[in-house]
Image: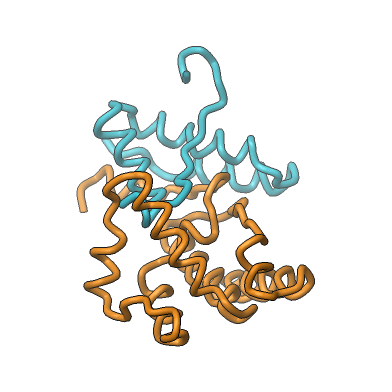
Chain colours: A orange, B cyan
Amino acid sequence: MDTLEAFVAALPKVELHVHLVGSAPVETVLALARRHPEVGVSATVKALQEFYVFSDFTHFLNVYAVVSKLLRTPEDIAELVRGVGRNLAAQQVRYVELQVSPYPFQGSGMSDAAISEALSIGARDVLAACGR
Amino acid sequence: MISAGMNVSLNSDDPPMFGTSLSNEYLVAGRDLGLSPAELAELAANGVRASFLDQPAKQALLAEIAAVPLPE
């Protein structure tokens, strides 16, 4: 790690524009793909990393749609919030304004109350893991 | 944008799907756009100022940012 990398790593940061689904770490997608084999997403790190490589906007939208399909239950949403939160906390991100669209979750049959509760559970778990 | 006086902050949108992370965006700003460490810290502080945090939380976080030693 050079001096600039060390400085950036130590710098406390905030994140004001980041999407929940678009932040899904490969490890979280892998866990969700194994939880929901019926969705048919490759459940290996290598395949997922290759799938995640940005080629153009259309492919990006496809990746986004596939990850959305893996979010079938409130527990899946909470798991994703925990994965995204861990990832951001590791970068010294101290505060996040996370963009969340309820539409794909409503499409999977989740109520607004269930979606909201799942987000709160995930956020609470992230803060607890950070000692807050 | 910075020299025009805009309140510029760095944010990452859909980071893993764009092959990046928030920290990487700071590195790109430093290496490819030529911002100094002090200017990168100012971008982080700008984000705090633009956030929905309350004033005491903003002040605390701004103090933490100011406390990080700048590399030579």
Question: Seen in the image, is A6 located left or right of residue A109?
Answer: left
Residue visible at 60% across and 54% down in the picture: A98
Q: Position of residue A108 (x, y in %)?
A: 63, 73
Q: In this view of the protein, which residue sits in the foreground, A78 or A88?
A: A78
Q: In this view of the protein, which residue sits in the foreground, B7 or A130?
A: B7
- Disc count in the image? 0
Residue visible at 35% across and 34% down in the picture: B37
Residue visible at 48% across and 71% down in the picture: A83
Query: Hey, which residue is sitting farthest right in the picture?
Result: A113
Does A17 appear above or below B72? below
Residue visible at 56% across and 26% down in the picture: B7
Q: Position of residue A45 (x, y in %)?
A: 27, 75
Quarter of the image where one finds residue B51: top right
- Look at the image and tell me in which quarter the C terminus of chain A lies: bottom right
- Look at the image and tell me in which quarter the N terminus of chain A lies: bottom left
Does B66 appear above or below A125? above
Does A31 appear above or below B16? below
Q: Position of residue B18 (x, y in %)?
A: 35, 49
Q: In this view of the protein, which residue sits in the foreground, B36 or A123?
A: A123
Q: Position of residue B36 (x, y in %)?
A: 33, 29
